[in-house]
Structures are given as C-alpha cells and as structure tokens.
Image (spheres, rainbow, N blue to C red):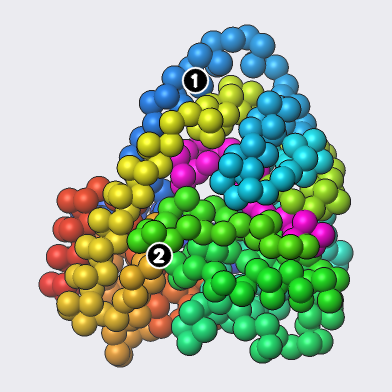
C-alpha cells in the first residue's frame, strides 16, 4: 500500500504525540501533569454558553450555514477590529470566518502555493505553518527567530534569493512558542519587504488579548499599506476559553480572503450557526471575563518565571501568550530534558526543537492548568533537576 509523498514527508503532529506520551504514562499509574498544550482549563464564560444553548434550540440553526459565514458574525468581527485597533474592514470582502484559525492557516497555503513554491516560515514556530506548506507541495524556508533579536525576524539576514522566490511569509506575535512580542518596527519592516518582493504576509494573532504589564499587542492591519499585502488570523479559542468550539476568522486583503474562500467552499460547509451566534456574544458581550483570565495567566506566569529563575533555569518574563519559553540546563538538549522531566517528575513539557531547528535548547511550558497543579509541577521539576 502506497500513500502520497506529501503524507510520507509529513511529521507527526506534536500535540498528538504529547497525547500519546500522557496516555502511556497514565497506564503506568503515573499522575501526569501536562504543561504541554495551550488548552485553557477554565470553562467558557457562561453568557457565551447560554447564547449557544438558546440558538441551538432554534431549528433555523440546524441547516447548512453560509459558506462565507453569517453576515451578522462578519459584521461584528469588523466592528471588534474597529473598537480594538481602529482598523476599518469591509465585512463582506475583508472578513472570512473559519472553523478555528488552525483550519484557515493550514488551508491558506493551498490558495497561495503551487508545487515547489516557497514559504517563509518562522523557526521556531507553530507546527501547522510547516505542515501546511508540505500539504500544499510547497518548499519551506525557515526564518530563524533568535534570542539576541528578541525572537523577532531579522529581515537583513534573510537570503535575498529566498525573498525573491517567496510567495508567502508567516508571522505570529505575541509568539507561540517563544512568548515574544513584536518589536515596534517589525510590522512596518514586514509590510515594506512584502511590498518590495511581492509576497503575502500572514499574521497569526491568536494571543492578541492575552498580554500583561500594560502591554497591548498591535495588529499588523494597523500598519500603513498592510491591507495591500497582509491578512491576519484570529480565534475565539484562547481569548474566551473556546478551544473546543472551533471558531475563528481571517481578515485583511480582499484578494487573499477571496482565494481562501474558494478553497474552503470546496472543502467545508462552514461553522454551525449557533456557534457563530455564540461568537457574536463573545465579541459584543461583557469583556470582564477577558480581564479576569489575563490576571489568572499573569499570576501563573509570575509563579513559573520566579520559580524557574530561582532554581537556575534562565527564563524571561513574557509580556504575552499562555506560554513561558525556558532554556534547558547544561548537559541536556530539548528532547532529552523534556523526557527527563516526564520520566522523573511525571510532568509533560513541549521540547523546543519540535517547533523548528532554532528551538533547540529550549522547552515550552503552558500556563493553562489550575494553580495548584502548576505549583505541584514546579515542585516536582525542582526536586528532579
């Protein structure tokens, strides 16, 4: 039996592999604490659940949804961008709802790349960027994100030949996995470079609302000229603890939106309308739940960073995301340290090299577990260093 070459080249999905390790350890009777996945343990806010229940009881929501998303949902996404970033969007041509941003990110490459076309992918970066390119038969060109440049791309260090060949570049700030934030000049440089070399910028903005210490994450669409070359992916998942609901969107350049829409209308049938109504409730209802979750993550971030620095693991205090990016101790590599922590402490972390070659020497810790379990995990790690 033979399969497509693209499948043979596709690496196992990181978090599916983490799930396997957790299951194996639990079968051995180990009380596993997983700090590997960014999946909020807190429930979706009640007012959003209530809206879902109300709309799900209306038979009108049980039929096929619009392929392009409910007009009312697109309108509220555009209104949210105006309130939050003072960005004007046409809800009919510059907004496209997605079955979670992961779906749109993986499909965008099908609408941009032909066989052998090049994509500039952050290294380290969310694994779906690389696998999306592979599934589109494209070529990955890694752009290293290094600590000396605050985990931002250095455009002066990208091979000009790669810039000329590239059709798309992905950015992601606040960043997964490094938890870095965008330098003030980053989006201006990105838009100027994309305009010069005629490629598309895709910005993954999933963590825009999870920021700390007075920092507010900017949208790339605020940058002059951005809508000429860029789109931005977003999601309700992390902001409103809705990872399982699969509801997100992409906004920006109308031509890119239209191309992705053509792919999607041939692949999926849209988002359950009751979930889109719940998305409207999330965006238009009280945002107190967002403030409360920021504080929850801020407290957990401080606990992790202060503890790790005290026990000798060099760790920066991030201004955003639900992650902490940690250097491994001398004598370890990313995978060996992750394995050591799992075997000795029963704690799961993500090895940095799983996000790309430049992630070697780091692990990623997620803050999406209850406070007491997070504290226990840190105690176990300290006891087994």
Looking at the image, residue 240 lies above or below residue 158: above
Which residue is drawn at the image coordinates 48% and 79% (left, top)? 150
Pick the quarter of the image with the C terminus: bottom left
The secondary element bearing badge 2 is classed as loop
Left or right of 181, for residue 232: right
Q: Which residue is mark 2?
A: 319
Looking at the image, residue 320 lies above or below residue 44: below
Q: Which residue is mark 1?
A: 51
Real-space Cα distance between discs 2 and 1? 32 Å
Q: Nearer the viewer, residue 157 or 119?
A: 157
* Residue 18 pos. (x, y %): 41, 59
What stretch of residues is rendered in magenta? 226-249
Quarter of the image holding residue 131? bottom right
Question: In this rendering, does residue 250 appear at all?
Answer: yes
Left or right of 374, for residue 88: right
Looking at the image, residue 149 lies above or below residue 21: below
Which residue is drawn at the image coordinates 29% and 81% (left, top)? 314
- Tell me whether the residue at label 2 lies in contact with that at label 1, contact meaning CB atoms closer than 8 angstroms: no
Q: Nearer the viewer, residue 270 or 191?
A: 191
* Residue 290 pos. (x, y %): 40, 42
Pick the quarter of the image with the N terminus: bottom right
Residue 233 magenta-drawn? yes
């Amino acid at each position: 039996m033979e399969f497509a070459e693209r499948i043979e080249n596709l690496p196992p999905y990181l978090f599916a592999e983490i799930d396997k390790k957790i299951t194996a350890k639990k079968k051995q009777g180990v009380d596993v604490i997983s700090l590997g996945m960014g999946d909020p343990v807190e429930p979706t806010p009640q007012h959003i659940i209530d809206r879902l229940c109300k709309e799900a009881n209306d038979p009108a929501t049980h039929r096929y949804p619009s392929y392009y998303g409910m007009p009312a949902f697109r309108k509220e996404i555009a209104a949210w961008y105006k309130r939050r970033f003072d960005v004007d969007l046409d809800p009919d041509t510059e907004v496209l709802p997605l079955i979670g941003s992961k779906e749109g990110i993986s499909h965008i490459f099908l609408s941009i790349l032909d066989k052998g076309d090049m994509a500039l992918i952050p290294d380290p970066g969310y694994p779906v960027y690389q696998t999306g390119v592979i599934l589109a038969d494209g070529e990955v060109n890694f752009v290293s994100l290094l600590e000396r440049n605050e985990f931002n791309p250095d455009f002066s260090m990208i091979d000009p030949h790669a810039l000329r060949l590239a059709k798309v570049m992905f950015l992601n700030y606040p960043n997964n996995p490094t938890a870095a934030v965008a330098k003030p000049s980053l989006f201006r440089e990105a838009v100027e470079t994309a305009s010069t070399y005629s490629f598309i910028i895709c910005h993954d903005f999933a963590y825009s609302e999870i920021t700390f210490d007075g920092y507010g994450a900017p949208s790339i669409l605020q940058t002059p000229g951005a809508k000429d070359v860029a789109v931005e992916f977003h999601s309700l998942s992390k902001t409103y603890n809705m990872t399982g609901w699969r509801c997100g969107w992409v906004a920006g350049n109308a031509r890119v939106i239209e191309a992705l829409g053509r792919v999607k209308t041939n692949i999926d049938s849209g988002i359950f309308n009751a979930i889109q109504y719940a998305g409207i409730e999330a965006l238009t209802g009280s945002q107190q739940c967002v403030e409360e979750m920021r504080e929850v993550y801020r407290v957990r971030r401080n606990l992790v960073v202060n503890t790790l620095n005290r026990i000798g693991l060099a760790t920066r205090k991030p201004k955003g995301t639900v992650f902490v990016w940690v250097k491994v101790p001398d004598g370890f590599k990313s995978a060996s340290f992750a394995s050591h922590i799992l075997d000795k402490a029963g704690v799961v972390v993500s090895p940095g090299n799983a996000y790309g070659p430049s992630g070697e020497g780091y692990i990623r810790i997620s803050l999406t577990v209850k406070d007491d379990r997070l504290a226990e995990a840190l105690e176990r790690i300290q006891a087994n260093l």
